[in-house]
Amino acid sequence: MAEQLLVRTLKGGKSTKIVTLNGKKITKMPSTLGNLPGLKTLDLQNNLIPKVCPEISTLTQLTVLNLGNNLLEEVPKELKFLTSLKKLHLFGNRIQRFASGACDGLQNLILLNLNNNWLTCIPEEICRLKSLTYLSINHNQLASIPRQLCFLRKLSELQLNYNQLICIPEEIKFLKRLQKLLLISNNIEVLPEGLCDLKNLRILDIAENVIRIFPPRFQNLKLKEFYCEENPLFLKKPVSAVQLEEVWSLQEITSRFIMNQLEDQNPFLMEAIERYPQVRDTISKGRKCALCGKSFLTIWIDCVEFVPPSKNWKISRNLQLVPLRMSICSYKCFNQRGPNLFGIAQV
């Protein structure tokens, strides 16, 4: 049946633009597709195809390829020759890996759908998909995502629902065009502070993770929709605690002095610091006190501040207060805190 349909298609020769062979129980991709160099759309979803034929590499004008719901075990290397491809659907296969070089020629790819596969990792080469705007890898087995994914400058929608992610790289801050981020049902414990730099982010869904607190500046995101159901968020239930004696290490005292002097542009230290890369590396890990604004190295008191969610957010029904992480440099500052800031108990 499929061969008969393809024979009819082949009569169109070079003028054939679209081939659709959905649900035909095809077990082998027809090699005669190589006789259709002008093909724009190839739809072979819902078949039994385990691998692509080598002849597909001749379809350099192809813009849409749908191989969803087949039996592929890898993202094929032959795809690198499809230099005009804009939309690639590979959902519902058995894909466990990307073949070496598979991303090399896909400079015009806008959409990549890898939902419902068996991927455990994403290759660093994903960053070669320079035009990628929409990426969906829901229902896989991803434990992490490479920082290189965050260099897809045109990405506006990223879906990573139902995986096994435990963290998101700090480099996510480079996805300046990202508008929609879906991370439902993972094992994420902490959101990176870089997330708060995404000025175009409008939809964020982190439901069903293990997040307890959000990074500073989170409340400044210009979200339209925010969902966080089924996370063990900190609740505003204060208890009394004893303040421990404040004893700083020599490294902490020295680091604080150097960092604050550098902020004041001390010319002697600014020149001297260039000669000591180890010191530069140490103080690069410093942060600012949420109250006094001075720099410090070691988190002295980890605090949470409860703020109401923005009135512009469409939110989960049960979200009344957003817990934000705040780092305080000393008990002196902690004792000058506002009524909605509390130390996090160590239990």
Image (cartoon, grey):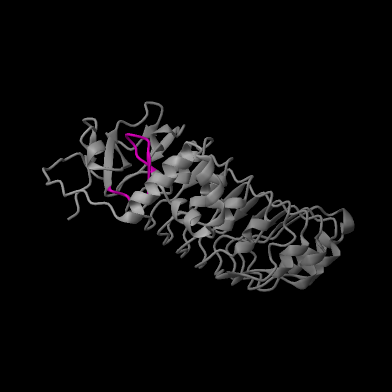
Can you give x and y, in whole percent of width and height, for residue 25 in the image?
Answer: 63, 69
Can you give x and y, in whole percent of width and height, for residue 116 in the image?
Answer: 50, 61
Magenta stretch: give its range: 288-300
Can you give x and y, in whole percent of width and height, for residue 253 in the image?
Answer: 33, 49
The residue lying furthest to the top in this view is: 311
Left or right, residue 148 beside residue 279? right
Helix, strand or loop: magenta stretch:
loop
Left or right, residue 336 beside residue 53? left
At 48% across and 51% down in the image, what residue appears?
170
Q: Identify whether 291 is placed above or below 185.
A: above
Q: Identify whether 247 is placed above or below 117.
A: above
Residue situated in front as seen by the camera: 189 or 243: 243
Residue 209 visible within the image: no
Q: Identify whether 87 is placed above or below 1.
A: above
Left or right, residue 323 beside residue 156? left
Can you give x and y, in whole percent of width and height, for residue 273 in the image?
Answer: 52, 51
At 64% across and 44% down in the image, what residue appears?
154
Residue 217 visible within the image: yes
Locate residue 261: give its quadrant: top left
Left or right, residue 86 beside residue 224? right
Residue situated in front as seen by the camera: 64 or 216: 216
Q: Split into 4 quadrants, where in the image is the C terminus? A: bottom left
At 24% across and 30% down in the image, what residue appears?
338
Q: Identify whether 277 is placed above or below 93.
A: above
Locate residue 337: give its quadrant: top left
At 67% across and 55% down in the image, what residue appears?
129
Residue situated in front as seen by the camera: 207 or 283: 283
Say if the magenta span includes residue 243: no
